[in-house]
Image (tube, coloured by chain):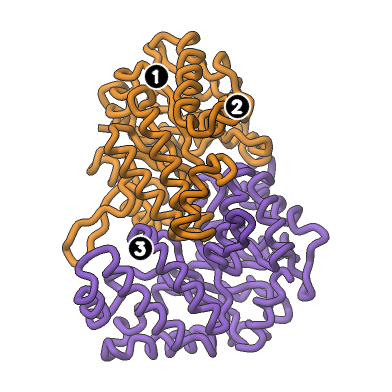
Chain colours: A purple, B orange
Amino acid sequence: MSFDRLCEKILACKNPTVAGLDPKLDYIPDWIKEESFQRYGRTLAGAADAYLTFNKGLIDALCDIVPAVKPQAAFYELLGWEGVKVLKETIDYAKEKGMYVITDAKRGDIGSTMEAYAEGHLGHTLVDGVELRAFDGDSLTVNAYFGTDCVKPLLEVCRRDGKTVFVLVKTSNPSSGELQDQLIGDRPVYRVMGEMVNGWNEGAAGQYGYGPVGAVVGATYPRQLQEMRAAMPHVFLLVPGYGAQGGAAADVAAAFDSRGLGAVINSSRGIMCAWKKEGCDPRDYAQAARREAIRMRDDICAHIQL
Amino acid sequence: MSFDRLCEKILACKNPTVAGLDPKLDYIPDWIKEESFQRYGRTLAGAADAYLTFNKGLIDALCDIVPAVKPQAAFYELLGWEGVKVLKETIDYAKEKGMYVITDAKRGDIGSTMEAYAEGHLGHTLVDGVELRAFDGDSLTVNAYFGTDCVKPLLEVCRRDGKTVFVLVKTSNPSSGELQDQLIGDRPVYRVMGEMVNGWNEGAAGQYGYGPVGAVVGATYPRQLQEMRAAMPHVFLLVPGYGAQGGAAADVAAAFDSRGLGAVINSSRGIMCAWKKEGCDPRDYAQAARREAIRMRDDICAHIQL
């Protein structure tokens, strides 16, 4: 239950990282795109087919060493429903290969609407009594500007289906402080959000001590990462911003508990574009991603006890 | 540019309302569902087909009297990519019939990701030099917890393609105050967000005085609605919460400027489920929706000068 499944995968791989699957056509080798365009034309379906080939190659190359993937919904939606179909196919493929899937969609809405997001992304859809699964990710990122109404339907699905969510607390982007660092009394907004996350986890800790509601805290703000690790001892952290966005291994080390658990560090561009940075044969893009994933794992594990 | 197109449609219809297209299977008459299930089975595709028939009927019945529709992405995502395909088909059909389409997806993310949401939902997708349109709504709802990074890519697309966005300021749900009413100095969070929205509109007002960045303020909080109308004189408002959620016409009147412009009031369940409330022949659901839309228009217009 809760984050136990993810913790077990992390322990099995000895690797607390997640590979972001945020494909852009620029990141995909020409040979993949050309094959897809030949089959489907320079269309949304053609681009979506290239995403899928690219993703499957990455998943094949990473699934025995990286515990989780995090597809970013925006890049799939950029290709319309054809892209969203490939988001689902990517989720299915990664799960088949044993990976934990965090759908990075940052959903948030009023209660009745959130029920639909919760069941659509994590749970099931009832069609005249038939139970179907629309996306069936293991975890979903959530924007809780709406407060508890937005999280309650997710808690239900998490409990029922053993899923998890990550609520935005302190995001990795340069302007995150415009709202998130403003003080409410003596506490910044991100801290207030963190205390709400603590509340949503009450009485729901799993075997490793973490409740079903995780939090997103960016590696680009190491002081706040350290602060929020201490302030949310039962909250599993998703930490974006390592690598391309500027966060270093020494910075992200603060996200972990004394067992080396309690956080996953994401890298998207670093892994997806390793073949460009290496300058290797583009047909070798997935092995370049694997080399980068190993480098990242070793970089982070040098700073923690896992 | 900006909200001019919506203002003109509102003036032409003499109706400042928007019909929410948030289909749930429960809202759809059995005769529609049975036809769809016969063709596609009790599957996500079958349910999605029922959505589309239901929506087209509503759009046909409303398009000459209601200026805009607001499909809620969550309910389409609940049906997976098959549902998202129907979201796109609904957007296309409503636009064909002359309606302004607000995609209610409440997206928000870091800058590079937001570019993908902006181009996917409002702008265009480049596939090897070919310009394609993924969803092509007229407007998108946005959650700006991330600050300016999240809004900048949207502003670009708004300027380039004449689109608009609505940023969440004070939401209509019961728990919205947990974060949004907390005080930053002497201003609640929603007020701080409202001032950010003011800033994003600077120098970009259209012919009717409204910039491209609108705001969501719920009818369920009439005092705050009045406050934010005054605090954001160049910000077009999207006002949910009328009807089913409890907001009354006298409450929403405060959202408008002296010309009866500056806001659209949403009703979703009220319109979609009018046939149930009326107890009319389910084959007459679309005309029941039309009757309710007229009742709502007259109810609101009795309180404003349009």
- Same chain? Circles 1 and 3: no
The residue type indicated by label 2 comes to: Gly
Local SS, label 1: loop
Q: Which residue is mark 1?
A: B15
The residue type indicated by label 3 comes to: Glu
Label 3 chain ID: A
**Labels 2, 3: front one:** 2
The alpha-carbon separation of the residues under discs 1 and 3 comes to 36 Å
Q: Residues within 10 Å of mark 3 (few under 14, many from 20)?
A: many
Residue A278 at x, y = what percent? Answer: 32, 87
The total number of labels drawn is 3
Q: Does the rendering let one see residue A22?
A: yes
Local SS, label 3: helix
Numbered label attached to residue A82: 3
Q: Which residue is mark 2?
A: B279
Q: Does the rendering let one see residue B107?
A: no
The alpha-carbon separation of the residues under discs 2 and 3 comes to 39 Å
Q: Is residue B298 left or right of residue B14?
A: right
Q: Is residue B76 left or right of residue A253?
A: left
Numbered label attached to residue B79: none
Q: Is residue A148 left or right of residue B193?
A: right
Residue B43 at x, y = what percent? Answer: 52, 60
Residue A119 at x, y = what percent? Answer: 61, 57
Label 2 chain ID: B
Q: Which residue is at a point 30% across and 47% down the rendered structure image?
A: B136
- In the picture, residue A29 is in which quadrant? bottom left
Q: Earlier along the polypeptide chain: callout 1 or callout 2?
A: 1
Residue A82 at x, y = what percent? Answer: 35, 63
Q: Residues within 10 Å of mark 1 (few under 14, many from 20)?
A: many
